[in-house]
Image (spheres, coloured by chain):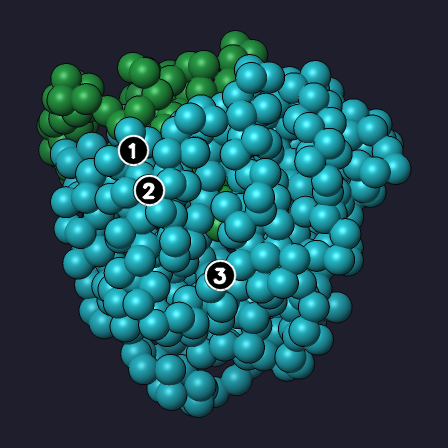
Amino acid sequence: MSESPSGAPHYVVWELTLRCDLSCSHCGSRAGRPRASELSTGEAFDVVRQLAALGTREITLIGGEAYLREDWDLVARAIVEAGMKCTMTTGGRAFTKERAARAKAAGVSAVSVSIDGLAPAHDRQRGVGGSFASAFASLRTLREAGLDITANTQLNRLSFPDLDALFDLLVAEGVSGWQFQLTVPMGRAAEHPEWLFQPYELLQVHPKLADIAVRGRAHGLLFWPANNIGYYGPHEAIFRNRGLAGEAVWTGCAAGKNALGIESDGTIKGCPSLPTSVYSAGNVRSEAIADLWREAPELGFMRRRQQERDARLWGFCKTCYYASVCGAGCTWTAQVFFGRPGNNPYCHHRALEMKAQGKRERLERVSPAPGTPFDHGTFALYVEDDETPARAGEPLAPASAIARPRRRLPIVPSG
Amino acid sequence: MSLHACPRCGRHVFAEDVRARGACPFCASKRVLAKGVFASLAGAAAFVSGIGCAYGMPADRYVEDDGGRTAAEASVGDGRAPDGAAVARDAAVDASRDAGDASDADLDASDQ
């Protein structure tokens, strides 16, 4: 494989178990029951040792729900003792005082609780009544245990109207950071295309995020965009510099470049969100992580030479002004919409360019997802006249209004 | 290649492109030429720990900058949310930028 320097998996997201105590309607991994053959404690310790040797700086433990695995805090302690930072992401249904104390004792630095809007929107998405209240109770319990608390939110048509109210609640709880990711049609989320933003709606979403980023600074709430937020719109500097002054910009998907995902059965991917069927590089049970990192094309695709990376681009992204540095944004997002990377419909610059031409893009599901973890359906992209221009600050149109386009133009091929 | 944020419209433009066109390709401002220093692609980002991944990898937390450091290593303070002093410093930077924006408008008007 011709590559630029191999780098190191500085940041690792590790699904400790697929077992979960929530039943989220947008869950990409369709979590609930544990995988058939999850890593043993000894195997997990060996993964920790290998990652430390590779130069990993931080490991975030996720699930399912990581705390449902009996030895979760032993793994966390091993990570910390190996010199790496250990953080956790939780649905927060039952982060009890006992569990919070175990996290603190293990050396966990911070815990991010998933909160997807106010109670009605959150509970609907999380599939369990009362889960919003539980999530906030977990935030308090974790804070009282002395852990740094952060939040993460799925951005979609259900959660978006609640962001201002949620901002106030998170500030009041002493949350120090807030990560956003656009909901995309992976796993169970593929069964709810009506929850997903249409690409042109990003023209309303991104100004709101920029507003939150700037306001958050004054409250010690640091804005953190996930990799599928962007790209290169007028708020790019605010997004990439967390609402602070700075020069950082989006520089391409981090999957396999400086990030790594591990599934609970030992499957390795460049990013935990990527569909396993296409992006599995191998398994820690049969191969050393260092060998996979160095050799597996499923991990090294973002380390390939510029010419090879550019060859993956198609559609709008192929001719985009930012193609050489952006690389079509988040690989996961493009993959789950169109079944291949290289053309990302969730892009601020793209929506702006469309609008400048009096056009907008609309996604429509063509086929459902088959029903396995990290699966996805297929979507078609339509370009249509922008007859109802949206402006920042206006409420989103109801789903029924966007489901009936007034005029269709040629379909962008999805294959 | 390097990208620089146009002080007028906020869009990022390639330095080489601005030199060739003589103005921002998005808003036609010539002010972007006056900035002189063009940012590198991977500038240091502020860093906060503990924001994990709920599907959607946190962006560029450990992207290496030109000096071979990671964003985490290049971060300010102790890596947590900014303290009051940091916020005040950033507010001052913003105020300076706002003043620059005002002069941009004058400059752009004179460009016509």
Give the number of the disc on residue A21. 3
Q: Are marks 3 and 2 in contact (CB under 8 Å)?
A: no
Q: Chain of mark 1?
A: A
Q: Position of residue A230 (x, y in %)?
A: 43, 48
Q: Tell me the distance, in whole angstroms, between the alpha carbons under discs 3 and 2.
A: 17 Å
Label 3 in the same subunit as label 1: yes
Q: Please identify the quarter of the rendering in which residue A371 is found.
A: bottom right
Q: Position of residue A203 (x, y in %)?
A: 33, 60
Q: Residues within 10 Å of mark 3 (few under 14, many from 20)?
A: some
User: How crowded is the residue under tag 1: few (<14 C-alpha within 10 Å), some, or many (20+)?
Assistant: some
User: Which disc number belongs to residue A192?
Assistant: none
Under circle 3, the secondary element is: loop
Q: Residue at x 19, y 44 (%)?
A: A173
Left or right of residue B25: residue A214: left
Q: Amino acid at mark 3?
A: Asp
Viewer-nearest residue: B97 or A54: A54
Identify the residue under disc 2. A97
In the depicted structure, whether residue A230 falls above or below residue A21: above
User: What color does chain A have in the rendering?
Assistant: cyan
The answer to whether residue A155 of the structure is visible from this angle is yes
Q: Residue at x 70, y 21 (%)?
A: A49
CA distance for labels 3 and 1 = 22 Å
Q: CA distance from mark 2 to mark 1?
A: 7 Å
Q: Are marks 2 and 1 in contact (CB under 8 Å)?
A: yes
